[in-house]
Image (cartoon, rainbow, N blue to C red):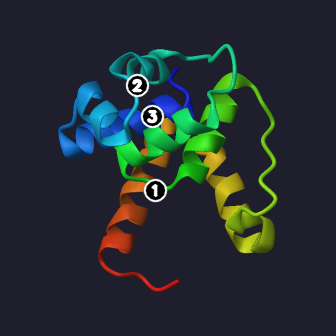
Amino acid sequence: MPNTLQEMIKHKLDQNGWSYSDVARRGGISRSTVHHLATSARLAQMPQQTTLEGLARGLGIPVAPVQRAAAEAAGVNLYLEDAPEAADPEVAILIASVHQLSPKDRRHVAVLVESLLQAGGSR
């Protein structure tokens, strides 16, 4: 069963027709690193911050969800003090609820959120 990081990468690749090389080039990281993160069900350790920033840049998404997904894949508890959900309990509830969904249902939620953001949804 794929982890959240794998699902995130696969979704962006499928959505945009990108390859591992495309993401690597966009993010300034190696293709082998993108491949490793996309295909490893369990990471031996938490990737370096610069790697996570490059992956996020390559995927065109914020770094915080990439950090959380990588931490989950590495079995690390990650506490982001300045993360928006730390200040907004509604966001924390949404995130906790999404984690309880099946991978298929999480993909549906991701597509819905992306469509709302593209439509200029209010904050």
Q: Is residue 42 above or below residue 115?
A: above
Q: Looking at numbered disc 1 in the image, what kind of residue is underneath it?
A: Val
Marks 1 and 3, how far apart at CA = 13 Å
Q: Which residue is mark 1?
A: 109
Q: Is residue 62 above or below residue 48?
A: below
| Closer to the eye: label 3 or 2 | 2
Q: Is residue 73 above or below residue 100?
A: above
The answer to whether 64 appears left or right of 80 in the picture is left
Marks 1 and 2, how far apart at CA = 24 Å
Q: Residues within 10 Å of mark 1 (few under 14, many from 20)?
A: some
Q: Are marks 1 and 3 in contact (CB under 8 Å)?
A: no
The answer to whether 90 appears left or right of 105 in the picture is right
- Residue 90 appears in which quarter of the rendering? bottom right
Q: Which residue is mark 2?
A: 34
Q: Secondary structure at mark 2?
A: helix
Q: Which residue is mark 3?
A: 7
Q: Residue at x 34, y 21 (%)?
A: 31
- Residue 23 appears in which quarter of the rendering? top left
- Residue 101: x percent and y percent? 58, 45
